[in-house]
């Protein structure tokens, strides 16, 4: 499988509130095996968050709805009983450094739950990147990618929602 680096990327959504600070990132333990481990001994992977995913500010009505941020364009779309209150929506941006030209695999979860005040939760699904099907580090050993997703919010659940998105990167 190879050497893995897992990064927990902070995500915040403000529904009718003030912006929040980025969450710190943490690296997961390494799994050393096979050729990828040999390559990693020479050039370990380094994963860094450059920008956290931020869905911006919206108001949610009685029917609930979704907020989506596209990783390629950075556009925010709202669906259902959701009103865009402005502010900046930001795609998440992650930078990877490692062995020049190496193929890597980037894995994002199928969904994550965000926590808000008073026990409220909202779910992020459809996390997608702007990566090709077989991403490679460039000749300089660097790769930068963006990602976005879809946030589902229940009716009238305003507040600040926060969570962490595990981003796993490993040599192929």
Image (cartoon, rainbow, N blue to C red):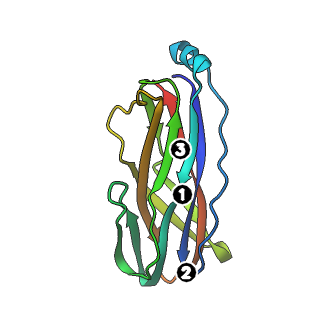
Left or right, residue 24 beside residue 110: right
| Mark 2 or 3: the one toward you | 3
Name the quarter where the C terminus is drawn.
top left
| Mark 3 or 1: the one toward you | 1
Whichever of labels 2 and 3 marks the residue nearer the N terminus, that label is: 2
Label 1 crowd (10 A; few <14 / some 14-19 / many >=20): many
Whichever of labels 1 and 2 marks the residue nearer the N terminus, that label is: 1
Numbered label attached to residue 52: 1
| Mark 1 or 2: the one toward you | 1
Above or below residue 71? Residue 55 is below
Could you tell me which secondary element the residue under label 2 belongs to?
Answer: loop
Provide the residue designation for mark 2. Answer: 158
Estimate the spatial distance between the alpha carbons at disc 2 and disc 3, rounded to whole Å: 27 Å
Above or below residue 88? Residue 170 is above
Residue at the spot 60% in from the left edge and 65% down from the top edge = 162
Numbered label attached to residue 167: 3
Q: Quadrant of residue 86?
A: bottom left
Q: Quadrant of residue 89?
A: bottom left
Above or below residue 157? Residue 10 is above
Left or right, residue 81 beside residue 88: left
Q: Position of residue 12 (x, y in %)?
A: 56, 65
- Answer whether residue 126 is visible to the viewer in this image: no
Residue at the spot 57% in from the left edge and 14% down from the top edge = 38
Estimate the spatial distance between the alpha carbons at disc 3 and disc 1, rounded to whole Å: 12 Å
Could you tell me which secondary element the residue under label 1 belongs to?
Answer: loop
Could you tell me which secondary element the residue under label 3 belongs to?
Answer: strand
Q: Position of residue 74 (x, y in %)?
A: 37, 61
Q: Are marks 2 and 3 in contact (CB under 8 Å)?
A: no
- Answer whether residue 85 is visible to the viewer in this image: yes
Estimate the spatial distance between the alpha carbons at disc 1 and disc 2, rounded to whole Å: 21 Å
Label 3 crowd (10 A; few <14 / some 14-19 / many >=20): some
Residue at the spot 48% in from the left edge and 51% down from the top edge = 93
């Amino acid at each position: 499988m190879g050497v893995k680096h897992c990064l927990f990327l902070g995500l915040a959504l403000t529904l009718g509130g003030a912006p929040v600070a980025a969450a710190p990132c943490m690296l997961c333990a390494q799994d050393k095996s096979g050729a990828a481990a040999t390559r990693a001994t020479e050039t370990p992977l380094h994963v860094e968050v450059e920008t956290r995913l931020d869905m911006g500010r919206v108001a949610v009505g009685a029917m609930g709805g979704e907020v989506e941020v596209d990783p390629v364009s950075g556009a925010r779309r709202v669906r259902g009983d959701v009103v865009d209150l402005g502010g900046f929506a930001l795609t998440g941006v992650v930078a990877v450094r490692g062995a020049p030209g190496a193929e890597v695999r980037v894995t994002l979860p199928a969904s994550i739950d965000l926590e808000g005040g008073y026990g409220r939760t909202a779910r992020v699904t459809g996390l997608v990147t702007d990566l090709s099907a077989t991403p490679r580090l460039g000749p300089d050993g660097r790769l930068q990618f963006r990602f976005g997703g879809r946030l589902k919010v229940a009716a009238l659940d305003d507040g600040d929602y926060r969570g962490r998105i595990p981003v796993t990167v490993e040599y192929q």
